[in-house]
Amino acid sequence: NLALPIGDNQTISQPFVVAKMTQLLEIHQNHKILEIGTGSGYQSAILSNLCRRVYSIEKIKELHILSNELFKELKISNITTKLGDGSIGWEEISPFDGIIVTCASKKFPQDLLNQLKIGGKLIIPEENEIGNQVLNSYKVVEKEKIEKKYICDVKFVPMV
């Protein structure tokens, strides 16, 4: 149950954290999920078994290429990826039922929250004011009403 290196100074989260974040999304079969930070593709592959469609954004070209090769090899057809800046999300595909961020953000990415449906959840590791990382859950209850919930302390690679 350890974070493992996947190249380019990035890691895959420990399996417990992947499971916890996935559980927090409360995924249903008809959901459309956005993942920020494709990495090795491990989290995407898990999500693909639980929902209708996974959209995933990776900023590091080498990881983007490797994860897409893996999806083809595993014959996973409900994952769509792009190379780009995940902090701004994927507006043209939104709204999403859930968004999962697999890297720690120093500032809250409002763009991601804006791309959620009513009832949608954002699961994100964030750096707090003293430099520690915490996993938070945000749920869009109504158009202008958001519920924030602290989940646990975590350690993720920073959002690049």
Image (spheres, rainbow, N blue to C red):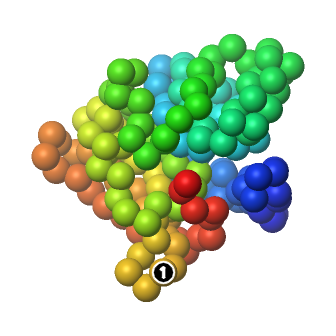
**Residue sitting at x 81%, y 50%:** 6
Q: Vertically, is 115 above or below 23?
A: above
- Image quarter where the C terminus lies is bottom right
Task: Tell whether 120 sits left or right of 77.
Answer: left
Does the rendering let one see residue 124?
yes
Q: From this viewpoint, which residue is outermost toward the bottom? A: 130
**Residue sitting at x 58%, y 31%:** 83
Callout 1 secondary element = loop
Q: Position of residue 116 (x, y in %)?
A: 32, 36
**Residue sitting at x 23%, y 52%:** 146
Quarter assignment of residue 137: bottom left
Task: Tell whether 112 sits left or right of 33.
Answer: left
Most foreground residue, 20 or 8: 8
The kind of residue on which mark 1 rests is Gly
Q: Vertically, is 77 above or below 61?
A: above
**Residue picked out by circle 1:** 131
Q: Position of residue 26 (x, y in %)?
A: 48, 41
